[in-house]
Structure formats: C-alpha cells, structure tokens
Amino acid sequence: MVYKDLADIIFPNAKDISYYEEKYPSRNLKEGAMVLRVAPSPTGNVHIGTVYQALIAKKLAKQTDGVFFLRIEDTDQKREIDGGILQIIDTLKNFDLEPDEGMISETEEKGAYGPYKQSQRKEIYQAYAKYLIEQGKAYPCFCTPEELDEIRAKQEAAKIRPGYYGVWAKYRTFPVEDAVKKIQAGEQYIVRFKSQGREDRRIKHKDIIKGNVDFPENDQDIVIIKSDGLPTYHFAHVIDDHLMGTTHVTRGDEWLSSVPLHLQLFYELGFKAPKYAHTPTLLKSDNGNKRKISKRKDPEAAASYYQEVGIPSLAVKEYLLNIGNSSFENWKRQNKEKTIDEFEFQLNKMSVSGALFDMVKLLDVSKIVISRFSAEEVYEQTIAWAKKYDAELLKLLENKDYSLKVLGIERGNKKPRKDIAKWSDVKDNIDYMYDEEFFKKAHNYEYQVISDKSDIDKILTLYMEKYYNENDDKQTWFDKIKELAGEMGYAKEVKEFKANPEAYKAHVGDVSTVLRIALTGRANTPDMYEIMQVLGKESIKKRFEKAMEK
C-alpha cells in the first residue's frame, strides 16, 4: 500500500490541488503592486495592534495600486467570541481602513479569492494536506494527549528540547498499512507535516524590516490538520497567502521565530513565499521599564477605547504612522494641507526594536488634528459620539447654529485652539458658553491679582456702561479695555507696569483677567473677544451681575 492510498482513505473527497490553482489564478496587477492582508482571529476584543497592521497594509497596497484584503482566521473555534467577526469589520470601518476584498459582514464578502473566512476553506486545506500525504511529506499521527504528555515529561527529565521531532515523532515512520488499519478501526488522529529540517543546519532570511537574520531549520513535525478537520494557523495561512496572491506579509515580530517553519511549508508545497516584514512590538513605559501593551492592563490596548473616549480615528492613524515611520511627523508639519494618503510609507524605515506607545503623545497629536477641523466637522463628530456616550452633551448641542459659533471660536486661524484632544473633552471645554449651564454652577471667582471687591465691581460696571459695544472690531475692543484700565489707575501696557510697578496697582492684563473670570468662571479660555461676540450683550450683562452679587 502506498502514500496515495493512505491519502485517499484520509481525504476521499478532496479535489486535486490543480483545481484550486486554476480557480485562483495569479492576480493581474501592475509591476510593483503589493497585495497585503490583515488576518485577525475573532477570539477577543480587537487590539490596537490589529489597527496598526491594517493601517500599514492598506497604506502600502494603496500607494502601489495593489490590494488590501481582510481574512478572518477562525480555525480556533473553541476560543471564538460571539460577534467577534463583526467587531473586526466594524473596527476597520471606524478607522476608515475598509478592505478592497474580504469579509464585509459575518456572512457576506467581496472579492474573487474567497472564501475569506478560514472555517469555510476546509476543503481547500484538506486538498493540500492530501497532496502532502501523497508526496510522503505528511502523515497521520495517533498520539493521545497522554502519550504527548509522556513524551514531554521524558524530554524535560533529559533536559532536551521539547517537541514532536526526530526519534520523538512516534508515528513519523509508522507503516502505511498499520495507519490504514487504525483509521478503519475508527481511531482518532491528526495530520502532521513530516519535516526534512535539521536543527544543526541554519537558514538565512532577509526580512524587510529586521534585515538579514538566520535561524536553525525547523525540524518539528507540526500539526497541519486537527482532529476536527480544520487546519492549524501555520498550514492555513501558507495556503491562503499563496492562493490569494499575497506578495508581502506584515505582522508583529513575535512571529519572527516562525519564519523557518513557514518558509519550509511554502517550499515543500511548491509555492513562492511572500516577502516578510516583522513590525516592532507596541510597547508601553511602566515605572521606568518597557513592556508589551496589554489588553488586560491598558485600556488603550483595545481598539474600541478610542471610539469610547472620542479620539478621532484620523488622530490615531497619524500617531501610528509616526510610530511606523519617524519621518511622518516632520512631513506632516511641512505639509499641513496634505492628507495622510499622500505620505509614502516605507517598511525599511520602520524601527527594528520595539515601538513605544505613548498616550500623552497621542493626545497631543489628537489636539493638533482636531485643531485643523472646521467647526462643522467638530460639531458633527461630537454629535455622533454624544449620541452613543453622552446624553447631556447631546442636549447641550441641540441649538446647532449657536453651537457652531461656540465651536468656531479660535478655529480656522493661523494659531487655532488646541484644548480639545477627544470628544469627551468637549463638554468641559464649552459648557460655560451656555447660560443654562453657566448659571447652574457655583463659581469661585478667584480674580488673581485684583482682589478689591469695589474695584472689581467698578471694572465690570464701567465696562458695560461705558466701554462695551458689540460692533467693535477686535483692536477697538482691546483699546477700550486699555482705556478702562487707565481710568481705574492700572497700567495700560504691561511693559509700563514692569518698568515702574510702584506707580500702578496692576496692569491691563489683570483687568482682562477680571473680565474673563466674571464672564466664564475660568482663568484660562480661548480668545475673550470671540467669546463675547458669541455670548452677546444680554448674557455678558447677566454674568457680570452674578459676579458682582457673589
């Protein structure tokens, strides 16, 4: 009895691999076009690392007129969570990283190289597993869990490398006839790859990011088809990347040690291997040490976190691009009007070591990104966020025309306001602009330098009675505050006060502070002239009256 007979008994209905080679022809793309994928498992909440990988893959595909596709690797069905696939699809959509091909819902897909869900490709993997068995490159293994534990215990006792290889591979040389008898008797088995590698030999490999690396050859007889008929990750992704025409695989550097096995599988199956680029691990600084960012310890490790707190997806992507290519930050500074699509991302410019993920820096980036938004964009995105996460804010923004004026303060000029890092910041940053909120709160009215109550009352009264005119331009408005300061015995210019502090009680800046705090209850706000223009005379008057009562 020969290997082909064994293969026919194990996979009687499997098609010849030529069927799939014809069904999935090489992609007709221009030279240099890159085909990349993101291939998460629906076994937990989506990690920010998945967004990072998707961003890189989509960027490279787009800038080379290639293809970016989403493949769902769901062969580990015991660990799959409810709604896991939809969560992956929604995450990519939320970050504007929708694929050219792949799953678009839990049951639908687009593209000619599917199914894009591994659990639906079972017959394909079995055809290639059958081919390997026919070639004598794979075999059934009947080891029970207890036998595998026993092998491992013996290896540990002898202090040798654990695994199923060489003399420890019990069924590697098992006679075909005996294997057939066991199968016909209904014994459970899995299919293993028969490795021709030797640990004392090394392979050399050029990684696009890591450069030249070398490893011992793989000599482990890994499982390729599990007892449920589904493949392991190692086997499935090799076949998928071949049939789907993947040219480049970008993945975390924790997979670097799997390169010898994966290249070996490509070679033994007669496939051309894609180019590999192992991206640096996302790290977090923790009490002076660096560790891998963790969903268990770090809320920001979950991709959903950014939507929940309201950090715009564009800000997250700009930050991740800066982690990926350090040249991005300078490029963006010099090309403020250009979109991130116009930046040329380069794999060989990625860091070889781990990339530090810093939330403080990300929030700074987000402030800059939001500062470039128009009032309309800020309003629409805040409303969309508030509908899900903040009913009070939604109610506050009911009057769209007024809210646009509020959000338009210090926006669209050379130095726009940078006080909003996320949509969850908006309420605290603008609620004082709404009378119903402002008059609800008890304000401390700490006026800083000027503390005399009669002086404060006089500044507020004089301003409204003598100096306020809602039609004044900004320069006229400020000149009048200077006049008010002079009338009250304060220096009209800060430099005058600094030159002769004994001659004045304080200066025009301190007078402005009194107006600002009476007006808003805050010492730090955006431009006071613009605030007054939005509030209008009646609101200003009522606020000053409240301040004087206090």
Image: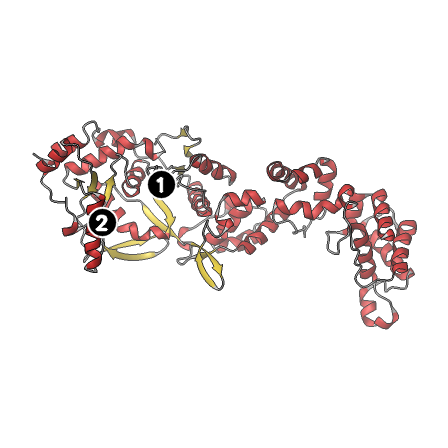
Q: Is residue 77 left or right of residue 509?
A: left
State the SS at label 2.
Answer: helix
Q: Is residue 427 left or right of residue 51?
A: right
Q: Is residue 446 left or right of residue 243?
A: right
Which x, y percent locates residue 69? 40, 37
Badge 2 crowding class, 10 Å Cα cut-off, few under 14, some 14 to 19, many 20 or more, is few
Going from N to C along the chain, the mark reached first, 1 or 2, is 1
- Residue occupying the point 37% across, 54% down: 209
Cα separation, mark 1 vs mark 2, equals 50 Å
Residue 517 visible in the shown view: yes
Residue 411 visible in the shown view: no
- Residue occupying the point 46% across, 36% down: 89
Q: Quadrant of the N terminus?
A: top left
Which x, y percent locates residue 37? 38, 40
Seen from this angle, which residue lies furthest left?
A: 1
Q: Nearer the viewer, residue 410 or 88?
A: 88
Q: Nearer the viewer, residue 85 or 59?
A: 85
The residue indicated by pointer 2 is 149
Which x, y percent locates residue 501? 84, 71
Query: Which mark, by number, is residue 50?
Result: none
State the SS at label 1.
Answer: loop
The residue indicated by pointer 1 is 31
Q: Nearer the viewer, residue 488 or 177?
A: 177
* Closer mark to the observer between disc 1 and disc 2: 2
Q: Name which residue type carries label 2.
A: Asp
Q: Name which residue type carries label 1.
A: Glu
Which x, y percent locates residue 239? 28, 38
